[in-house]
Image (spheres, coloured by chain):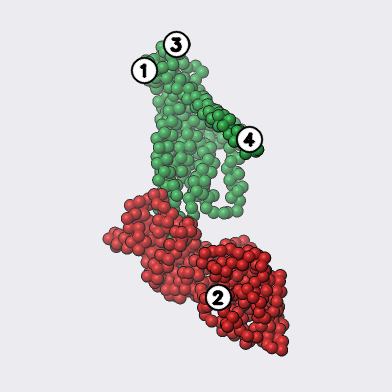
Amino acid sequence: MSMVSSAERLPGRRRTAWIPRALLYLAAILVSLWVLVPIYLIALAAFSTQDDVYRYPKKLLPTNLSTETVSFFLNSEGVYGSLVRSVVVAVGMLILTMAIGTPAGYALARFAFRGADTFRLGLVSTRAFPVLIIAIPLSVTYLRLGIDDSELGVILAHTAFGLPFAVLVTASVFAGISVELEEAAMTLGCNRASAFSRVVLPLALPGLAAAAIFVFIVSWNEVFAASVLTLRDRTLPAQVLSTLEGSPLPYKFAGGFFLLAPAFLVIFVIRKYVFNMWGRTVR
Amino acid sequence: MAEVRFEGVRKMFGKFAAVDDVDLTVRDGEFVILLGPSGCGKTTLLRCLAGLEKMDGGTVRIGGRDATDLPPRRRGIAMVFQSYAVFPHMTVGRNIGFGLRMQKVGKAKIDEQVLSAASLLHIENLLERYPAQLSGGQRQRVAVARAIATKAEVLLMDEPLSNLDALLRLEMRAELKGLLQKLDVTTIYVTHDQVEALSMGDRIAVMNAGQIVQCDSPLQVYDKPADTFVGGFIGTPPMNFLEAKVAGNGSGPIVQLSGGTLPLGGQSVEALVGRELVLGIRAESIGVEREAASELIEAKVLVIEPLGSHNLLTVRSGSDTLKVSTGPDFFPEPDTVIWLRIAPERIRWMDRATGAAIETGAERPAESSVMVEAPTAEAAAP
């Protein structure tokens, strides 16, 4: 009896089995559109003529591409300088963050030291601390130290933001590399340092690169601290933000594009390398 | 080549003594197996020798030299890890040559030694491959080749075969044994697989709870376990243990078991009389009879497992359950009564309280084939 009824139910179940799958794809498409449509429109506007930017209804297809809007933005007062400054800050912060974060992540992954869990929790909790509260004391401190309105100042602030991520991500990267590999290297003639540089580091590189991308973008997109700590020499997001209100529409679109583009470029370029390495290093 | 010596080695993990005061000498060129259940400290002991664990007490000597405080790279050892630990970012050839490159050996010499190590393990055609492109068995070979390429004085192996499937393990076991005989290198090999231990080692050091319980040749460990732990751990099925007492009566000493009594014949029993004893007997040392006789013990068949080469019987005698190995043509029905012949000279006596074996001074024949339904002429008269 029960066998018969289950056999009868089977075709019915099969008929409806595609529904959850279809819903999943639908959800994925909607989420993708939600992210991609604004990006597309911004990019489209940035590469349109200024007239097209103002025109309503908007054109949805790139029929009349032009660098007019972009060059207008780049030639605007202070934009080029802030673009360069953003690169300098992001790269400087990237180097500093990874230089401090990687050893910390390694220690967290490899050694069971007293307070390791507290340290981990402490790292996470720094992100729960609103930047707003420390903005004024920080500005005062920067003024006293004379590093206000400087690349170094913003680099230090961004390093503080990026470091917890860097430590946690690199810790999980190192935790994924078997200790036995390191030990094998040590029985084969390595000391701790050369075991790290010859075995652990090459294997960790893809993960470290991913962490670096993330950290880079933390700095590139950070606007609040950069706005508070600088006045004249601003990073791109801070510059765009401060001039946004009084700017024409083409400036806004081109500015938006320039904030987006490097992050995308970095993700796409390094992502390929990351997956290559992982493909080869699967156990 | 080098002798390895552990002297009072201790290793604590918190308050837990993983290795508790171990003394062991491995002779130059000898192949010693560290055998024990998981958590017995065998791997920790090996890692102490490799320098991967810092010891809490004692000394390790390699080739007469105190190696206690030396880093792994200065100990003259090579190690094969359980997970193989083959470097995923290097080709097989570079993996095997890694130790030699670290020793700054010349390029030509490296190539030569890599090739010879690789051909010993039949992987010389895989030198350009990456580990991800290899099967588990091939990776295992790379790990062994890498360890022997440096020609270290002492080779350490930590459960090297445990990640292979059963068939491959069987094949690799024989190959590895042959290889190690050829290399004549001092080898310490950790395993929890007693078949591996019995079949490969010159000597087996059986470990339990951080200590070496017995260290003897495989046959000795199998036939004369030092205590109930060793007897129960080694052998499939494990040794049978029956509660027993030895008493003298008019016609000579007898063994009192829960399922009957057994004459001991001409055994020397001074050490046994009046003690609480455990009678240890291997499944294949018990003969089975269909007919009763005065020197036999009655038992009821519970389960019969035909295993091809022999049948394994689970029988109940009194309050004891025993495993008995019989010939493949002995098929008693479950619940029928059979009679067990326990040869006195095959008995291993243990103290019931401590579990330690009692040496009676009685000699045992070294090897005897399994006897099924032994001819009545051979049955000893009382």
Side of B101 where B77 appears, left or right: right
Residue occupying the point 62% across, 77% down:
B342
CA gap between label 2 and label 1 equals 98 Å
Type of the residue with mark 1: Ser
Q: Which chain carries label 1?
A: A
Type of the residue with mark 2: Met
Given the current orientation, which residue lies at the most extreme bottom position?
B250
Marks 3 & 2 on one chain: no
Image quarter where the N terminus of chain B lies is bottom left
Residue occupying the point 44% across, 24% down:
A257
Q: Which of marks 4 and 1 is in front?
A: 4
Q: Where is residue A19 in the image (x, y as percent from the top left)?
A: 55, 28
State the SS at label 4. Answer: helix
Q: Name the residue under label 4.
A: A5
Q: Where is residue B56 in the image (x, y as percent from the top left)?
A: 57, 67
Q: Which of marks 3 and 4 is in front?
A: 4
Residue occupying the point 44% across, 54% down:
B136
Image quarter where the C terminus of chain B lies is bottom right
Q: Mark 3 points at which residue?
A: A55
Marks 2 & 4 on one chain: no
State the SS at label 3. Answer: loop
Chain A tint as drawn: green
Q: Can residue B204 be seen in this view?
A: yes
Type of the residue with mark 4: Ser
CA gap between label 4 and label 1 equals 67 Å
Residue A66 shows which numbered tag? 1
Instruction: Indicate whether A100 appears above or below B345.
Output: above
Q: Nearer the viewer, mark 3 or mark 2?
A: 2
Side of B277 where B182 appears, left or right: left
Residue B371 shows which numbered tag? 2
